[in-house]
Image (spheres, rainbow, N blue to C red):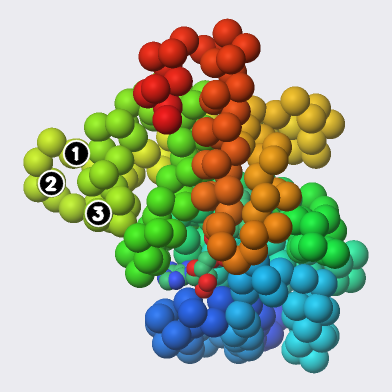
Amino acid sequence: DAQQLELATGSKKKLRRFIVIDEVVDELYGSKVREYFEENNVQHKILALPTTEETKSMDLVLNILQEVQNFSIDRRTEPIIAIGGGVCLDIVGLAASLYRRRTPYIRVPTTLLSYVDASVGAKNGVNFLQCKNKLGGYTPPVASFLDRSFIQSIPRRHISNGLGEILKMALMKHKGLFDLLKSHGKYLLDTKFQSYSGSAGHGDAALQTTRIAIETMLEELAPNLWEDDLDRLVDFGHLISPELEMRVLPSLMHGEAVNVDMAFMTYVAHARGLITAEEKEQII
Ligand SMILES: NC(=O)c1ccc[n+]([C@@H]2O[C@H](COP(=O)([O-])OP(=O)(O)OC[C@H]3O[C@@H](n4cnc5c(N)ncnc54)[C@H](O)[C@@H]3O)[C@@H](O)[C@H]2O)c1
């Protein structure tokens, strides 16, 4: 950020950043992240943590806050950076919102699900007393930096997991996105949402699909950022899934639980005469 650079150089103050990174992501990309900060002469502290659904708790938030306090960041000019999946982004978002009542933070999503979903919007949170996201708030990040190349290292099952949230947006908002998934879904799964030139017949399906998923999500979230209106299209698939996900933890991933919920509700919608048998078959 040129303005920040000027601010820092102008005041002879060295740029500083506190980074929380998922420990698996750290193993894969940590050296590049360190290299980046070193090359840019940024004093930094990188905290690698096991951020999984089972560890998504207030304990981890307090752990981060302790380290933030030790590093002693300047709340006005030193945003906390979160690099990881949806769990990491949610935990760090909550920690940042609590530290000195609100400290800016940046999201860098590294899974497909967090790339298309948790990167957008204001929500953060942790699980509490076996209840999903029971503690949390609405503090939007100052920025989300999207780099699809992170997704190439996530396991195939995690790609399907993210596809669940993309399908949600397709079913709720965008027929074109549904058609893209029908035509290129298998290809996207196989190629882990990377863009390849010369992929006959597929164009840049990864770019198109992720862009539409994010844009449709933004359209829904922006006018209702604080969820004053609880009748939200983006909540499709999130009625029975939170309890299901927590009850069988760690068997089902978030997007898988959402998929189960969406499948069940598709049958309900058909039974109520809201969709045709053909539409039901296509969705299932
Ligand atoms: N705040 C929001 O708006 C929002 C929206 C959707 C979901 N969520 C939350 O997101 C969470 C699910 O996120 P998720 O599906 O990203 O799961 P996750 O954060 O648990 O990540 C899944 C696993 O992938 C690993 N991983 C992350 N990036 C990787 C990479 N590039 N290569 C290899 N492995 C990698 C992690 O170590 C982790 O074990 C849920 O807790 C859900 O509540 C939040």
Mark toward the start of the polypeptide (1 vs 3): 3
* Residue under the image location 25 percent in, 32 percent down: 183
Q: Is residue 43 above or below residue 194?
A: below
Q: Amino acid at mark 1?
A: Gly
The residue where tag 3 is placed is 190
- Contact between marks 2 and 1 (CB within 8 A): the answer is yes
Residue sitting at the far right? 101
The 10 Å Cα crowd at callout 2, few under 14, some 14 to 19, many 20 or more, is few
Task: Left or right? Give the position of 135 relative to 80.
Answer: right
Horizontal side of 100 relative to 45 (left or right) equals right
Q: Quadrant of residue 241?
A: top right
Query: How many numbered circles are shown?
Result: 3
Give me the residue at 62% from left, 12% from top: 272
Amino acid type, callout 3: Asp
- Tell me which image quadrant ligand 1 sits in: bottom right
Q: Is residue 115 left or right of residue 5?
A: left
* Of marks 3 and 2, the one in the foreground: 3
Q: In x, y percent, where is residue 166?
A: 47, 40
Q: Are marks 3 and 2 in contact (CB under 8 Å)?
A: no
Given residues 16 and 190, the one toward you in this image is 190
Q: Residue 27's image quarter?
A: bottom left
**Label annotation for residue 203:** 1
Q: Is mark 1 within 8 Å of ligand 1?
A: no
Instruction: Identify the residue position indicated by label 2 in the image.
Output: 199
Residue shown at 74% from the left, 32% from the top: 224
Q: Which mark is residue 275?
A: none
